[in-house]
Amino acid sequence: MEDWVYRALAKWPNVPDVYDWMGLDRRGRWLIRGEIISRPQIIDTINRNYEADARGCWFFQNGPQRGYVALAYAPLILRSDGADRLLTHTGLPVLRPQAAFLDEDGAVTLLTEHGPGLIGDQDLDWALARLRVDGAPLDEAQLAEALALRSGEPTALRLQAGDQRLGVARIDAADLPAHLGFVRRPQP
């Protein structure tokens, strides 16, 4: 977080938290009361002051006030940089992905050093090009087989992410928050 945030917290320590005002959609766009925030300066400020509390609830620290964020899917949305690297929607490079998950609809989520991140729908080709079975590119039958597994089961899929080859588990979208330790709709 930025220094001005810490100064504001010290000056006004008892400002109440805000819930159900902010959101993050599946494309990594910030929302306020359901409307997309489009002003670059505001987006940059939110990106720099976005993190999780001990409960796994993600928030934007706006000076002394903490605004909890309702998540459409995951706390981070991952995008390809056009090469082999992924970036979070907040602009952080993903250097050490730790695990990969496939939900019932084919969405791919990674556990990264920054937290859980959904690979954005505009970058699913990035993921599909890097999914392998026994070192060979994935085919439709293998993907269908992985999607048919029950939540919590490992798949035969491996995701090549940079220098890492991650096993891919089949986890239903509804099970991801508990499995990865985050809260989609924070409450007081």
Image (tube, rainbow, N blue to C red):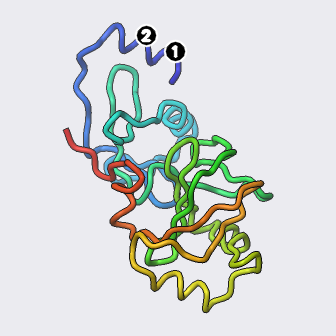
- Few, some or many residues within 10 Å of mark 1 (<14, 14–19, 20+): few
Q: Position of residue 1 (x, y in %)?
A: 51, 24
Q: Residue furthest top?
A: 11
Image vertical order of residue 2 relative to residue 131, above or below: above
Q: Label 1: state its secondary structure.
A: helix
* In-front residue for pair 119/130: 130
Residue at the left extreme of this rendering:
188
- Callout 2 amino acid: Arg
Q: Residue furthest right?
A: 83
* Quarter of the figure with residue 104: bottom left
Q: Which residue is mark 1?
A: 3
Would you name the residue on which mark 2 appears? Answer: 7
Residue 187 position (above or below residue 164)? above
Looking at this view, is 146 or 48 the one in front? 146
The quarter of the picture where residue 81 lies is bottom right
Q: Nearer the viewer, residue 162 or 3?
A: 162
**As drawn, 157 above or below 96:** below
Is residue 176 found left or right of 47 in the rendered image?
A: left
**Where's the C terminus, which quadrant?**
top left
Q: Residues within 10 Å of mark 2 (few under 14, many from 20)?
A: few
The answer to whether mark 1 and mark 2 are in CB contact below 8 A is: yes
Give the residue displayed 36% in from the left and 42% down from the top.
Answer: 56
Instruction: Report the amino acid beneath label 1.
Output: Asp
**Vertical order, 98 against 100 (above or below):** above
Rendered residue at 63%/42% (across/down):
91
